[in-house]
Image (cartoon, rainbow, N blue to C red):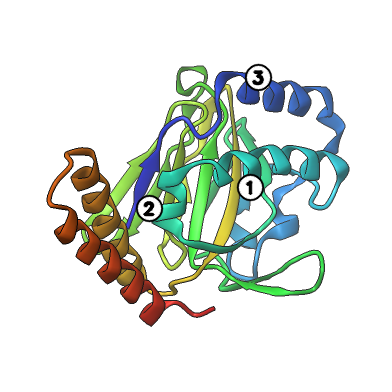
């Protein structure tokens, strides 16, 4: 399931993150530092050094926003979220076709399975040319270039790339989620069921029927959850 979530960061949060990234320009390093074996040869960008105070400070802003976003919770069903990272593309920088590594190691040494990949756009799309995230699935290629503050989620199993930036700078936040539900198909069904329940709640539909659907949702989550 490829899903966009608008307004994950509000205007104040977005302004703060942008200002902090601009102030600490010397903390940008070669993006290959966190690339896997297959990704390193095709990764040409920069990112904020992982585990630095700036990365943790801005990552906490993003994590706080995600915790308050019901659409993200419903779609990703997060068990663990890898600390958010921040990258930028400019002057022809690009990231070729790759699949994200299956497992990443958290700062405390715990291993995290990457079920869901996420990109949170931080730059105004009119401020740069190129830089589209292109995700491939069974229905073809999907090009994503979102307004600043918007997020896209997609299965970490997907082949994807970022097209070269020919003008301006594309800045984004990216991270991975280990979901309570490993299967993308099962997460999609639960997301659709949860959305239907919310719409029925808003329309004050038959209470007994809604209660049955809520029970079905939680029983499926109980059946499919790996925690």
Residue 136 vs residue 26: left or right?
A: left
Q: State whether residue 19 is above or below residue 204.
A: above
The front one of 133 and 61 is 61
* Image depth: mark 2 or mark 1 in front: 2
Rendered location of residue 37, percent (x, y) = 64, 71
**Image point 43% across, 68% down: which residue?**
157
Mark 1 element type: strand
Rendered location of residue 162, percent (x, y) = 48, 45
* Image depth: mark 1 or mark 3 in front: 3
Label 2: few (<14), some or many (≥20) within 10 Å? many
Residue 44 is labelled as: 1
Label 1: few (<14), some or many (≥20) within 10 Å? many
Q: Rounded to the nearest whole Å, what is the CA distance between mark 2 and mark 3?
A: 28 Å
Residue 166 is labelled as: none
Q: State whether residue 214 is above or below residue 89.
A: below
User: Which of the two discs, 1 and 3, labels the residue nearer the N terminus?
Assistant: 3
Residue identifier under label 2: 135
Residue identifier under label 3: 15
The front one of 50 and 68 is 68
* Image depth: mark 2 or mark 3 in front: 3
Residue 218 vs residue 73: left or right?
A: left
The front one of 169 and 182 is 182
Rendered location of residue 217, percent (x, y) = 30, 67
The front one of 27 and 218 is 218
């Amino acid at each position: 399931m490829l899903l966009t979530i608008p307004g994950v960061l509000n205007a104040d949060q977005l302004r703060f993150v942008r200002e902090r990234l601009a102030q600490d320009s010397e903390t940008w390093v070669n993006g290959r530092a966190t690339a896997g074996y297959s990704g390193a040869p095709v990764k040409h960008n920069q990112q904020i050094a992982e585990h630095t105070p700036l990365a943790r400070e801005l990552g906490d802003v993003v994590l706080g926003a995600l915790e308050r976003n019901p659409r993200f919770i419903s779609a990703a069903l997060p068990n663990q979220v890898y600390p958010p990272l921040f990258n930028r593309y400019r002057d022809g920088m690009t990231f070729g076709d790759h699949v994200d590594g299956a497992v990443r190691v958290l700062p405390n040494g715990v291993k995290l399975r990457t079920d869901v990949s996420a990109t949170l756009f931080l730059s105004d799309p009119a401020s740069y040319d190129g830089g589209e995230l292109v995700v491939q699935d069974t229905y073809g290629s999907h090009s994503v270039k979102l307004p600043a503050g918007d997020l896209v989620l997609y299965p970490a199993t997907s082949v994807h790339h970022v097209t070269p930036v020919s003008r301006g700078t594309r800045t984004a936040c990216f991270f991975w989620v280990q979901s309570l539900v490993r299967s993308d198909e099962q997460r999609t069904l639960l997301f659709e069921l949860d959305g239907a329940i919310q719409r029925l709640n808003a329309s004050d539909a038959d209470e007994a029927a809604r209660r049955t659907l809520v029970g079905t949702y939680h029983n499926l989550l109980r059946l499919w959850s790996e925690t």
